[in-house]
Image (cartoon, rainbow, N blue to C red):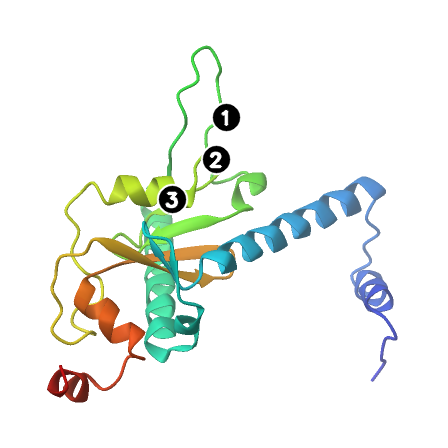
């Protein structure tokens, strides 16, 4: 097996095997796209373990199995819905566009690779919708979502769920953020380390 002494040498071997010689412009676009994705991952990771709109940070929540499994479940539901909607020809992207009189801003084009880069947000209650964050902030989007009556996404996972949620727990998944509506009871359970529901209920 041939080994490479550096990333550049490895990349050169891959390109040679593919018989592909990118132009300088193509290399610049590839590098720029990678930089954007890396930036989106860092931004999403910065929100991981945060409760909004309070802004409370609990990075220790990222290590909980319950939080990890919730993120995996929502992303799996999203990807399944995307495939179903694609076959049905339905749109799966929502985007808030700021009112700018006299200025026509480009709309999100799901077929434009440039629109696929960046930070995206998926609400657990509506995992079939991807929210583009091109013209928005996570905090503003969450604030708008909280204006509607919101059930807790952690029932029946959390013990004695209060059903009604007033916060969102943010879960970072690559360049995506998963927003899970959470009630005070399920939040208390998670912050306690997500212990066995029966044991947690017996020591309340």
Categorize mark 3 by other alpha carbons within 10 Å: few (<14), some (14-19), many (20+).
few
**Residue at image point 11% right, 73% down:** 160
Between disc 2 and disc 3, the foreground one is 3
Please, what secondary structure does the residue beneath circle 3 have?
helix
- Residue 192, given in percent of the width and then of the height, sits at 28, 78
Q: With 133 as the anchor, is 195 left or right in this view?
A: left
Residue 201's image quarter? bottom left
Q: Position of residue 72 (x, y in %)?
A: 38, 69
Camera-side residue of 142 and 105: 142
Is any atom of residue 107 visible in this view?
Answer: yes
> For residue 200, which quarter of the picture?
bottom left
Q: Nearer the viewer, mark 1 or mark 3?
A: 3
What residue would you read off at disc 3? 139
- Near mark 1 (Cα within 10 A), the count class, few <14, some 14-19 or many ≥20, is few
Please tell me which residue lies in front, 112 or 95. Answer: 95
Residue 188 lies, with reference to residue 137, above or below; the image says below
Q: Are marks 1 and 2 in contact (CB under 8 Å)?
A: yes
Return the mark for residue 202: none
Q: Which residue is mark 1?
A: 106
Q: In the rendered view, does 12 fall on the left or right side of 128?
A: right
Which quadrant: the C terminus?
bottom left
Mark 2 — residue? 109
Identify whether 115 is placed above or below 6.
Answer: above
Residue 120 position, x and y percent, is 45, 48
Whether residues under marks 2 and 3 lie with C-beta atoms below 8 angstroms apart, the answer is no
Tags 1 and 3 touching, CB below 8 Å: no
């Amino acid at each position: 097996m041939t080994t490479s002494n550096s990333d550049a040498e490895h990349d050169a071997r891959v390109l040679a095997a593919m018989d592909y010689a990118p132009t300088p412009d193509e290399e610049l676009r590839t590098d720029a796209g990678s930089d954007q994705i890396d930036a989106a991952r860092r931004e999403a990771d910065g929100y991981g373990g945060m409760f909004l709109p309070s802004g409370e940070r609990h990075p220790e929540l990222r290590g909980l199995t319950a939080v990890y499994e919730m993120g995996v479940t929502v992303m799996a539901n999203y990807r399944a819905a995307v495939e179903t909607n694609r076959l049905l020809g339905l749109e799966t992207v929502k985007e808030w566009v700021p009112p700018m009189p006299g200025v026509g801003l480009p709309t999100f084009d799901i077929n434009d690779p440039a629109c696929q880069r960046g930070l995206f947000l998926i609400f657990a209650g509506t995992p079939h919708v991807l929210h583009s964050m091109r013209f928005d902030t996570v905090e503003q989007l969450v604030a708008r979502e909280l204006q509607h009556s919101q059930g807790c996404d952690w029932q029946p996972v959390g013990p004695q769920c209060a059903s009604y949620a007033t916060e969102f727990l943010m879960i970072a998944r690559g360049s995506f953020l998963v927003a899970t509506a959470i009630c005070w009871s399920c939040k208390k359970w998670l912050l306690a380390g997500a212990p066995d529901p029966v044991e947690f209920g017996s020591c309340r």
